[in-house]
Amino acid sequence: MGRYLTRKLIIYIITFLFAVTLNWAVPRFAPGDPIKMLLSRFEVMEGGKDILESFFVKTFGLDRSPLQQYVGFWRSLFAGDLGVSISQYPKSVFNIIRGAIIYDFIILLPAIILSWIIGNKLGAFSGVNKKADNFLMPVFYFLTSSPYFWFALVISYVFGIVLGLFPTSHAYSATMRPGWTLAFIWDFFLHWFMPFLSLFLVQLGGWAIGMRNMIIYETNTNYAKYMESLGATERLIRNYGFRNGILPQVTGLAISLGTIVSGAVLTQMVFSYPGLGYLMVQAIKQNDYFLIQGCFLFLIIMVLLANFVIDIIYMFIDPRVRHSYSGEV
Amino acid sequence: MKARWIVLAVVLSLALGSTAALAAERHETLIVGGGTWSAATSWNPLYPNNTNGTVGLVYETLFGYDPLTNQHKPWLAEEGKWISDDVYEVKLRPGIYFSDGQPLTAVDVVFTYELARDNNLTYSPIWRTLKEVKALNLDTVQFVFENPSYQEWQIELYSRAILPKHIWKDVPGEDLMVIANDNPVGSGPYKKLLAGPDRNVWVRDDNWWGNKVFGQPKPKEIVDMIIYENNVALGMLMQRTLDLSNYFIPGVPAIKNLYGLTTWFDGPPYMLPANVAMLILNVNRPPLDDAQFRRALAFAVNPQTIVERVFENMVPLCDSTGLFGGWTAYRDAEVAEKHGFWYDPAIASQMLDEAGYIDLDGDGWRDMPDGSAIQFEIIVPAGWTDWMESIRIIAEAFRAIGVNANPAFPDQALYEQRMQTGNFDMLINNYGSGISGSPYSYWNWVANHNIHREYVTEGNFGRYDNQELFDLIFEFNQLPPLSDESLAVASKIQEILLVDMPSIPFWLNGMWAQMTSQYWTNWPTEDNPIGRPCSWGNQWQFGAIDMLINLQPAR
């Protein structure tokens, strides 16, 4: 157990150092100077841009050598300082991310977890029930293979414009003020529903198909046949199959949860819903070094954390993992 | 189940913060969109990337500017004029005060300008010709120049936000552009109410000094929504959750009546013009270094096709000189007649033939006189769909006269880098061609002199080097508006730009505006030309405040 965790931790630390370094380097060596890009869009007096340019270069320390910048980057990272955004100057990267990330969680966490639970249940059901399978499979395939952008637009158009049930965009009405009032919470819920639903449905299909195939596979394995010959009930065999089939699904869940911060770019675009995904795209477009760094740092930490948690969970749900590290084979 | 609710409650409380206030009434709220693309970060008028509305709604300028009539509208100033060749005198309106109750006087105007003298700010270059700003009394300011830049001054008059001295005098010089100025105190009709990740909300200042002078703006609140996609804006217009959309929305001519949308013109071109879309040619890449070749390209394209197919007649064609709006006062019809261009591929072909660009190797494409191949790439940023479609048409037109040109769509960052470093053949751009109080801004962008550097940021991305033209543009800046001398110099500038054709103006991008009338009526239109329906940044003083004053609640 201890050996397992230590080894995993070392791997994670190396991965972290490597990923963060890449994250620092890639935007800096990519084409497009963020300050020059910002300048070209300002309409200021002749000569004003030169003043701004020297102000920015000094402010962001871009006149220092790359090595100095790299060392400075790690130093401020350990001080908990992610720097200041260039495109959204003078707001700090941390504040920008904090303001946006909450919306990713609100939409994605329920969508991923609910679609995972319901998708697995439906998939398992579909795997053992031929009649239901004939009807459910096409639905699952439709959901999982329809392009998300199109699917979300259809949902937005049907539920928003045609039926007029839900507002088509933003986190809450323009006339609402955030606060703990029933009216606001209801308004917030209405705005939340379509982005949530679109993500929930699209992911549901994938989980269900995965589980269905796993169940069919598991019920045809030798151990299942052996159990059958011993006279085990179909229900018991199915339960064993489910326990085995869930393993890859858990890994999939971990990856989904880890990439949560970048997962909803299209949702945010279709519904103009705030969040980190869209912010990240904008940061990349404008090559805003510091904002890109900050966003990806969050992404790296989330992915590593999710994987780490899954590694631990695996020890409980998969005895093989536990045994291989504690030498009790 | 209980745990889940607790989680939701925690999450919600984090998202909402602690501010709780009553919702505004919809019929008193004006919802706009199109001028804000990311969450607000700064309300500092000294920092050019400040939140849309900082200048105009909160801080005010000495003058407004009406692009329709090309008139400066006295705003904080009651009047302003050149009392001698070198002295501009501004008389302030009586009874102006900031939202904290302190009066706005000549002292604040002097302070605003001296701030740029004593520190490095974006308008510090004005002190190259400005010698002194003095307050004669509390409502009279004199700007004393030496060889004033009259044209640039026309723009300066409506650009500079006047700051309250009693607040800004305590800001250390090195912090002037750094501070976010979270609680802006200005003299304008609105105050900052809140800024969320997807919106900025402004609330009317009922004590605004201008109520008695101009009238009170009708909307109690202005909500500026951040909308990522133009189809979302269209959805919001249909749902009536957006009153004024300043997005380019394809298909507006077709659906406008169906969904009850108002546009400035009821029929084509529907929109007012906002800026010139230029095809910029890299004059350092042969054969684009040959003026004859460049001029031939201008004749090859039918911009009408672009206007019809890409913009569905929502934009007007552009004059050969590129001048539109108030700038046309400087247009020399004779020069335009003599050196202008129009769509005629036969002329284009003939010009190329004469200059020796013919197909030498029989591959169907024209070659350089020495036999080497000619091939061009035209670029616009990926995802800018209207421009992408436009350069497809332009490339097609060039190919039709035997010039091998192809469209390409690099990412925006790459596009801008290539543009600024001169690493392109041709591209479409409009960053500095926006409507303004003087064609100086346009010419100084089209043919900026500051091109001998690695990154060019002030315009003239094709790096067209013509000292004579640079001198003329400089000279034009130093001449009084619409004086005979200025008109003469303007003619020469137009002639050089047409004869040498370093870039080709093809069409005018629209000041996109679609309005709904469920909650607000009396929108500015062709038949009701009071104000300008535009919520874009730094254009509130172009008549948008007048629009706010003249709006009528629908019920």
Image (spheres, grey):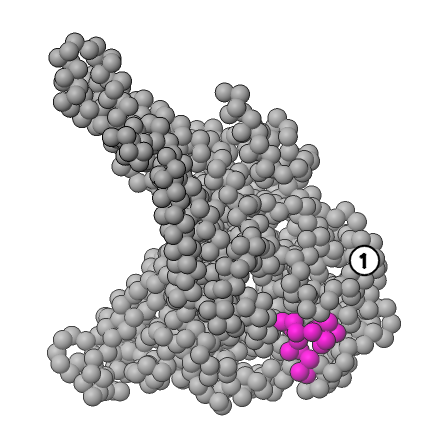
Q: What amino acid does circle 1 point to? A: Tyr
Q: Residue sitting at 24 percent across and 14 percent down?
A: A236
Picture quadrant where residue B463 is located? bottom left
Residue at the extreme front: A327
Q: Residue sitting at 57 percent across and 55 percent down?
A: A79
Left or right: A207 as drawn, with respect to A176: left
Left or right: B545 as drawn, with respect to A131: right
Q: Residue sitting at 46 percent across and 56 percent down?
A: A293
Q: Can residue B335 be seen in this snapshot?
A: no
Mark 1, other Cα within 10 Å: few <14 / some 14–19 / many ≥20? some
> B253 or B409, which is in the foreground?
B409
Left or right: B303 as drawn, with respect to B404: right
> B34 or B121, which is in the foreground?
B121
Provide residue A28's location: percent of width, then percent of height: 43, 65
Residue at the extreme right: B137
Provide residue A215's location: percent of width, then percent of height: 22, 24
Per the image, the residue denoted by label 1 is: B97
What is the quadrant of the N terminus of chain A in the image?
top left
Asked if residue B154 is positioned above or below residue A254 in the image, the reply reads below
Provide residue A304's location: percent of width, then percent of height: 40, 44
What is the quadrant of the C terminus of chain A in the image?
top left
Residue at the extreme bottom: B468
Is residue B122 highlighted in magenta? yes
Asked if residue B367 is positioned above or below residue B54 in the image, the reply reads below
Picture quadrant where residue A118 is located? top left
> B161 or A127, which is in the foreground?
A127
Q: Residue sitting at 81 percent across and 62 percent down?
A: B166
Q: Which residues are magenta?
A: B114-129
Dominant SS of magenta comes to helix
Q: Secondary structure at mark 1?
A: loop
> B551 or A250, which is in the foreground?
A250
Provide residue B240's location: percent of width, then percent of height: 53, 38
